[in-house]
Amino acid sequence: MRSLPSGSYVAPVAHINQRLDLELSPRAETVESYVLTRAAEKSWQICNRHLESEAGALFSIGGPG
């Protein structure tokens, strides 16, 4: 891990809405081109199975690493 020189600081970056325009819903071309991978489809099936069960479930979804 790199350390910062004495007296320096890390400046916060602009909020995301100051860097780009956010949309309330996806554009049609985005939705039309979306492809669900087999792994993602299986993950959604597992999530839906847990959500539909009477007992419910607690789970989290994380990314790589």
Image (cartoon, rainbow, N blue to C red):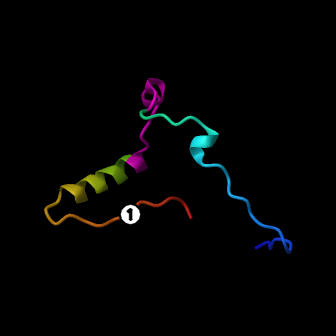
**Residue at image point 17% right, 60% down:** 53
Which of the 4 image quarters holds residue 37? top left
* Residue extending furthest toward the front: 7
Residue 39 forms part of the magenta stretch? yes
- The C terminus appears in which quarter of the rendering? bottom right
Q: Which of 51 and 23 is in front in this view?
A: 23
Position of residue 34 relative to residue 51, above or below, is above
Which of the 4 image quarters holds residue 58? bottom left
**Residue at image point 24% right, 59% down:** 50
* Residue extending furthest toward the left: 54
User: Badge 1, how many Cα within 10 Å: few under 14, some, many 20+?
Assistant: few
Q: Which of 20 and 38 is in front in this view?
A: 20
Q: Where is residue 55 in the image (x, y as percent from the top left)?
A: 16, 66
Q: Where is residue 57 in the image (x, y as percent from the top left)?
A: 25, 65
**Residue at image point 52% right, 37% down:** 22
Q: Position of residue 26 (x, y in %)?
A: 44, 32
- In this rendering, would 18 be left or right of 47? right
Position of residue 54 relative to residue 18, above or below, is below
Range shown magenta: 26-40
| Residue highlighted by disc 1 | 60
Residue 8 forms part of the magenta stretch? no
**Residue at image point 40% right, 46% down:** 38
